[in-house]
Image (cartoon, helix red, strand yellow):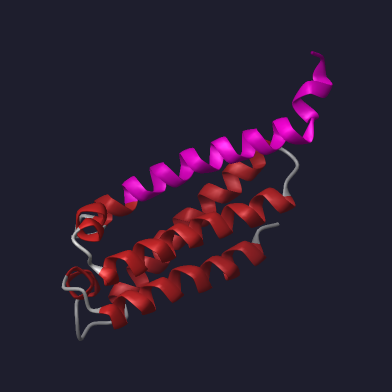
Amino acid sequence: MGSNFWQHPLIETAGYFSVVVLCLVVSMVLFEVVTKYKNWEEIKKGNVAVSLATGGKILGICNIFRYSIERHSSLFEMLGWGLFGFVLLIIAYFLYEFLTPHFNVDEEIAADNRSVGFISFTISLGVSFVIGASII
Protein backbone atom coordinates (compact mmCIF):
# COMPACT_ATOMS: atom_id res chain seq x y z
CA MET A 1 0.00 0.00 0.00
CA GLY A 2 2.15 2.81 -1.29
CA SER A 3 1.24 6.32 -2.20
CA ASN A 4 -0.82 5.03 -5.14
CA PHE A 5 -3.39 3.66 -2.69
CA TRP A 6 -4.50 7.19 -1.70
CA GLN A 7 -4.71 8.23 -5.37
CA HIS A 8 -6.99 5.39 -6.43
CA PRO A 9 -10.31 6.83 -7.68
CA LEU A 10 -12.38 4.68 -5.32
CA ILE A 11 -10.36 5.81 -2.31
CA GLU A 12 -10.48 9.46 -3.40
CA THR A 13 -14.25 9.25 -3.93
CA ALA A 14 -14.76 7.67 -0.52
CA GLY A 15 -12.58 10.37 1.03
CA TYR A 16 -14.47 13.23 -0.63
CA PHE A 17 -17.79 11.63 0.20
CA SER A 18 -16.87 11.17 3.86
CA VAL A 19 -15.59 14.72 4.26
CA VAL A 20 -18.58 16.28 2.49
CA VAL A 21 -21.10 14.25 4.51
CA LEU A 22 -19.37 15.36 7.72
CA CYS A 23 -19.39 18.98 6.51
CA LEU A 24 -23.06 18.65 5.59
CA VAL A 25 -23.92 17.40 9.08
CA VAL A 26 -21.95 20.26 10.68
CA SER A 27 -23.58 22.74 8.29
CA MET A 28 -27.06 21.54 9.17
CA VAL A 29 -26.25 21.86 12.88
CA LEU A 30 -25.09 25.44 12.27
CA PHE A 31 -28.26 26.23 10.30
CA GLU A 32 -30.26 24.78 13.19
CA VAL A 33 -28.53 27.28 15.47
CA VAL A 34 -29.17 30.32 13.25
CA THR A 35 -32.85 29.61 12.54
CA LYS A 36 -35.55 30.21 15.12
CA TYR A 37 -37.29 26.92 14.40
CA LYS A 38 -36.06 23.36 14.84
CA ASN A 39 -35.70 21.95 11.33
CA TRP A 40 -36.13 18.26 12.03
CA GLU A 41 -38.95 18.70 14.56
CA GLU A 42 -40.89 20.83 12.07
CA ILE A 43 -40.24 18.41 9.21
CA LYS A 44 -41.46 15.53 11.39
CA LYS A 45 -44.67 17.52 12.00
CA GLY A 46 -45.16 17.87 8.24
CA ASN A 47 -44.09 21.50 7.85
CA VAL A 48 -43.54 21.72 4.08
CA ALA A 49 -42.06 25.23 4.23
CA VAL A 50 -39.31 24.07 6.60
CA SER A 51 -38.77 21.01 4.43
CA LEU A 52 -38.34 23.22 1.35
CA ALA A 53 -35.99 25.62 3.14
CA THR A 54 -33.94 22.76 4.60
CA GLY A 55 -33.83 20.91 1.28
CA GLY A 56 -32.57 24.07 -0.41
CA LYS A 57 -29.82 24.40 2.16
CA ILE A 58 -28.78 20.77 1.69
CA LEU A 59 -28.76 21.10 -2.10
CA GLY A 60 -26.92 24.41 -1.86
CA ILE A 61 -24.20 23.04 0.39
CA CYS A 62 -23.77 19.91 -1.72
CA ASN A 63 -23.65 21.99 -4.89
CA ILE A 64 -20.91 24.20 -3.48
CA PHE A 65 -18.86 21.16 -2.51
CA ARG A 66 -19.47 19.67 -5.95
CA TYR A 67 -17.83 22.68 -7.56
CA SER A 68 -15.04 22.59 -5.00
CA ILE A 69 -14.30 18.91 -5.66
CA GLU A 70 -14.34 19.50 -9.40
CA ARG A 71 -11.84 22.35 -9.25
CA HIS A 72 -9.34 21.16 -6.64
CA SER A 73 -6.99 18.23 -6.60
CA SER A 74 -6.32 18.18 -2.88
CA LEU A 75 -8.77 17.30 -0.13
CA PHE A 76 -7.65 20.28 1.94
CA GLU A 77 -8.18 22.80 -0.88
CA MET A 78 -11.60 21.29 -1.56
CA LEU A 79 -12.49 21.51 2.10
CA GLY A 80 -11.28 25.10 2.44
CA TRP A 81 -13.19 26.37 -0.59
CA GLY A 82 -16.27 24.34 0.35
CA LEU A 83 -16.33 25.81 3.84
CA PHE A 84 -15.77 29.30 2.47
CA GLY A 85 -18.73 28.73 0.14
CA PHE A 86 -20.82 27.56 3.09
CA VAL A 87 -20.02 30.79 4.97
CA LEU A 88 -21.18 32.75 1.92
CA LEU A 89 -24.39 30.70 1.88
CA ILE A 90 -25.05 31.64 5.52
CA ILE A 91 -24.42 35.29 4.64
CA ALA A 92 -26.97 34.96 1.81
CA TYR A 93 -29.47 33.55 4.33
CA PHE A 94 -29.01 36.60 6.59
CA LEU A 95 -29.29 38.93 3.58
CA TYR A 96 -32.59 37.27 2.64
CA GLU A 97 -33.89 37.93 6.14
CA PHE A 98 -32.58 41.52 6.07
CA LEU A 99 -34.01 42.28 2.62
CA THR A 100 -37.52 41.23 3.62
CA PRO A 101 -38.32 43.79 6.34
CA HIS A 102 -42.09 43.44 5.91
CA PHE A 103 -42.09 39.97 7.44
CA ASN A 104 -39.82 37.67 9.41
CA VAL A 105 -38.59 34.84 7.19
CA ASP A 106 -38.00 32.41 10.06
CA GLU A 107 -41.45 33.04 11.55
CA GLU A 108 -43.14 32.60 8.17
CA ILE A 109 -41.29 29.35 7.48
CA ALA A 110 -42.07 28.08 10.98
CA ALA A 111 -45.74 28.89 10.31
CA ASP A 112 -45.55 26.71 7.15
CA ASN A 113 -45.75 29.59 4.68
CA ARG A 114 -44.79 27.51 1.66
CA SER A 115 -44.24 30.52 -0.56
CA VAL A 116 -41.52 31.80 1.76
CA GLY A 117 -40.11 28.27 2.12
CA PHE A 118 -39.97 27.89 -1.66
CA ILE A 119 -38.22 31.24 -2.13
CA SER A 120 -35.76 30.21 0.59
CA PHE A 121 -35.17 26.97 -1.33
CA THR A 122 -34.52 28.79 -4.60
CA ILE A 123 -32.26 31.39 -2.98
CA SER A 124 -30.11 28.70 -1.35
CA LEU A 125 -29.83 26.70 -4.54
CA GLY A 126 -29.43 29.69 -6.86
CA VAL A 127 -26.79 31.37 -4.74
CA SER A 128 -24.91 28.07 -4.49
CA PHE A 129 -24.49 28.07 -8.27
CA VAL A 130 -23.03 31.59 -8.16
CA ILE A 131 -20.73 30.68 -5.28
CA GLY A 132 -19.71 27.44 -6.98
CA ALA A 133 -19.02 29.12 -10.30
CA SER A 134 -16.71 31.62 -8.57
CA ILE A 135 -14.63 28.94 -6.82
CA ILE A 136 -11.21 28.95 -8.43
Percent across and percent down for residue 119 are 37, 79
Horizontal side, residue 134 vs residue 90: left or right:
right
Whole-percent x, y for residue 97 in the image: 29, 73
Query: Which quadrant holds residue 132?
Result: bottom right
32 shown above or below 51 = above
| Quarter containing the C terminus | bottom right
- Residue 108, above or below 85: below
Viewer-proximal residue among 87 and 62: 62
- Residue sitting at 16 percent across and 73 percent down? 111
Q: Position of residue 105 (x, y in %)?
A: 24, 74
Residue 48 belongs to magenta span:
no
Residue 47 lies left or right of residue 127; in this view the side is left
Q: Is residue 20 left or right of residue 76?
A: left
Identity of the residue drawn at 20% across and 86% down:
102
Q: Residue furthest bottom?
A: 102
- The answer to which of 122 and 90 lies nearer the viewer is 122
Chain part drawn in magenta: 1-30
Q: Nearer the viewer, residue 79 or 6?
A: 6
The residue sitting at 59% across, 40% down in the picture is: 17
Image position of 119 with respect to 73: above or below: below
Residue beneath the point at 67% across and 48% down = 69
Determine if the magenta segment contains residue 17: yes
The mark tally for this picture is 0
Pinpoint residue 121: horizontal percent, then vertical percent: 41, 72
Is residue 40 shown left or right of residue 78?
left
The N terminus: image quadrant? top right
Q: Quadrant of residue 37?
A: bottom left
Q: Main secondary structure of the magenta part?
A: helix
Decide: is 71 above or below 106.
Answer: above
